Image (spheres, coloured by chain):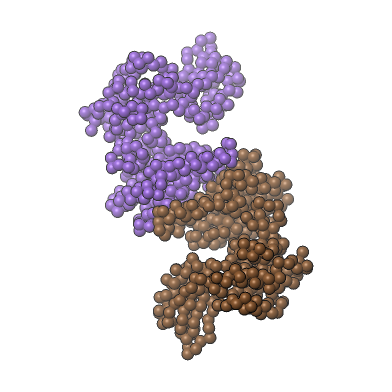
Chain colours: A purple, B brown
């Protein structure tokens, strides 16, 4: 008997028939004797419907109230799902965030889970019930409803799996696993049987939309085996797990791609200690994630500072950065939204020399100019003009031979 | 400066434009310096939409899960409403039942409010915020979501008004007050300026749909002045208030009418002590409200017992009563759904002899046969064949001259 947490996304519960279909999959696990916790998203399209409703009433909806509104989406799904199970004589109970006691901070719209008191979930499991939990949402310490941002249901599932020390967390979605790159961009993309937490973290942070990044962080930190698979096939999907030797033998596992970033450049910044903190602390305080930061070598005590932020946060970032730039007597603040980020990811990069050179070489051969570079232990990212984005993906996928599964990887 | 609780029904908040319209009414009160608590229903049609969704997944939806589902209706309205206010720079906060701490028993679908901890509402009012509370719902002692049944938002409003010792509770609806009878049945119906709590209680219990009966009970018990008025006019509506001498001078204030009852007859019941309790206790335990009970004089130690229950509860009632009838060796259990109840109501009835006679006389003159009679201090109800229902209303309205306001009633 295992304790399994399953998460089903919006398309998997998109209408009553699909809810019934998913429920039957859950019932199978339950009849096999497993303890089942099911985290559900809102029905596909519902969140957008609610956002549109909000926009009819407020140009810029209040974040607290927007979360109250959006939270109804998952509430509908979990109740319908539990109803269906009960109609099949399977004991079930839905829990909303204040009942499942999923506590978050108060960053409406992108709250972070700070803890889960699993007492109520355990109590329901003890009664042999299938527990369905509304994904995507939490409550702060005084009971205000918060939401975790798009993809937050993955985080809910992993946070619950970690808190319950579940044997497995399965993320059901409309794709059947993690691919070497987005198959819509390159048809030679290949599904990976296994990928390490770190690779998945990099891929998620680089724009691969299969898994929400915080959820992978939970999985890694608490070592929860995580499987990404499709609701609509019986394909085993991709297992996200701890790193092993086989994984390390391959220099590059995948090519990630994103058009979600915008670039901000502050020119002729006085190169003094404390300048960076004056610029970036207020940005961080606004919960805006700065990705790449590049500072050129200074000339005459002045330097150019360039960094990227999510496109959606560009306006707010500029509002924060502009007055600071004036204060520190920088020359000007420029921004550019027509950029793309293409990255290669692989734990094997650590032991394989020349990966970066091969990447730059392939890009140059295709005539793609690199605007910014950033590296971590297991990834190399390049910012390029967005019109070259898809081309770069195909070029890199070919350059690292990703269409062919390497023999040592089972 | 007054503390005012306002409740707006489903048609009043039926679409974004109407929500904005209602909100402007609330803002007016707030700008006039009043403390405002606003209780909202789900948008018109939303509850039915959700019920239909539930029925696609379960023939007989689990009551706990159905309440979780239905509670989203009001959640949507309060968040949209508060968003609109905040968009107008009016401070506002929505509270759901677990936040407003509206505690109920665990009778899903028809829960009763057992207490409200108003600390959070008061806290928000202190911040000079317009507080919007999701009507129709509560939480039990472990945080399960319950709903109060149709019309439950009225109860929420009155319970909050009573708990806060509000100066006034205004119930906004799609009719502009309380009428001498349903204007759709008789066009001579007249709006009453004032009506007593007791009269309103009788009218509500007799099927007048203007106010939910429990809400009137709260108003009476805590002496909350209550005004019923229309969202769509500036008409002052009807004030429901404590009885006074002027009211007592009029024998009959209104004619109520309902087709919601079904009749159950158990024939040849042994007339022994304890029989009634054996029949009615399990019915009451199932939270089914028995209205009229009539027991004929017994002949040879056997009697016929007839009672009425809401039509929607007839099936369950028969399932409860049938085995008991067998146990006590009664002859048979009959039921009849084609009945109507017509009633006259008035606090003046106490001091006016001959009201009943005038009622029966008018019915007889119109050829309407009376099947059951039940009286209270301030009302007389008759069960008749349903085909005569509307006729009876008109006949009684005329017989008591209700189309003309009596001169002593200002």
Q: Nearer the viewer, residue B136 or B91?
A: B136
Residue occupying the far bottom of the picture: B300
Evaluate whether residue A127 shows in this view.
Answer: no
Q: Residue B367 appears in which quarter of the rendering?
A: bottom right
Q: Nearer the viewer, residue A51 or B405?
A: B405
Q: Is residue A371 above or below residue B371?
A: above
At 55% across and 19% down in the image, what residue appears? A333
Question: As drawn, is A75 to the left or to the right of A343?
Answer: right
At 37% across and 52% down in the image, what residue appears? A130
At 48% across and 26% down in the image, what residue appears? A309
Q: Residue B360 appears in which quarter of the rendering?
A: bottom right
* Residue A151 point in image, percent of width and height: 43, 38
Q: Nearer the viewer, residue B126 or B324?
A: B324
Q: Is residue A197 above or below residue A98?
A: above
* Residue B138 point in image, percent of width and height: 53, 56
Question: As drawn, is B88 to the left or to the right of A392?
Answer: right
Quick one: quadrant of the C terminus of chain A? top left
Q: Is residue B299 above or below residue A93?
A: below
């Amino acid at each position: 008997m295992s304790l399994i947490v399953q998460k089903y996304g919006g398309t998997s519960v998109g209408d009553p028939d699909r809810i019934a279909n998913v429920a039957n999959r859950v019932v199978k696990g339950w009849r096999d004797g497993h303890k089942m916790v099911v985290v559900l998203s809102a029905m596909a399209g519902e969140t957008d419907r609610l956002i549109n409703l909000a926009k009819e009433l407020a140009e810029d909806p209040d974040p607290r109230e927007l979360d109250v509104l959006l939270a109804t989406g998952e509430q509908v799904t979990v109740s319908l799902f539990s109803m269906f199970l009960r109609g099949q004589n399977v004991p079930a109970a839905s829990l909303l965030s204040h009942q499942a006691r999923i506590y978050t901070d108060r960053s409406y719209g992108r709250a972070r889970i700070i803890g889960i008191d699993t007492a109520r979930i355990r109590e329901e499991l003890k009664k042999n019930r299938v527990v369905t939990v509304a994904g995507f949402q939490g409550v702060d310490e005084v009971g205000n409803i918060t939401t975790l941002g798009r993809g937050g249901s993955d985080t809910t599932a992993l946070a619950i799996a970690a808190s319950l020390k579940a044997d497995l967390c399965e993320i059901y979605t409309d794709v059947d696993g993690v691919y070497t790159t987005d198959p819509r961009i390159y048809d030679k993309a290949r599904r990976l049987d296994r990928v390490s937490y770190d690779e998945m973290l990099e891929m998620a942070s680089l724009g691969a939309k299969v898994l929400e990044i915080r959820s992978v962080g939970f999985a890694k930190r608490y070592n929860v085996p995580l499987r990404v698979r499709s609701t609509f096939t019986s394909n085993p999907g991709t297992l996200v797990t701890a790193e092993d030797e086989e994984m390390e033998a391959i220099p590059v596992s995948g090519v990630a791609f994103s058009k979600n970033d915008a670039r901000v450049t502050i020119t002729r910044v006085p190169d003094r200690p404390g300048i960076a903190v004056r610029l970036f602390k207020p940005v961080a305080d606004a919960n805006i994630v700065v990705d790449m930061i590049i500072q050129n070598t200074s000339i005459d005590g002045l330097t150019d500072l360039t960094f990227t932020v999510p496109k959606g946060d560009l306006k707010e970032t500029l509002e924060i950065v502009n007055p600071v730039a004036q204060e520190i007597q920088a020359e000007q603040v420029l921004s550019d939204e027509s950029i793309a980020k293409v990255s290669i990811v692989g734990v094997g990069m650590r032991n394989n020399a020349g990966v970066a050179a091969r990447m730059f070489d392939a890009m140059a051969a295709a005539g793609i100019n690199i605007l910014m570079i950033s590296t971590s232990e297991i990834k190399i990212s390049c910012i390029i003009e967005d019109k070259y984005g898809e081309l770069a993906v195909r070029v890199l996928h070919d350059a690292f031979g990703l269409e062919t599964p390497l023999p040592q990887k089972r």
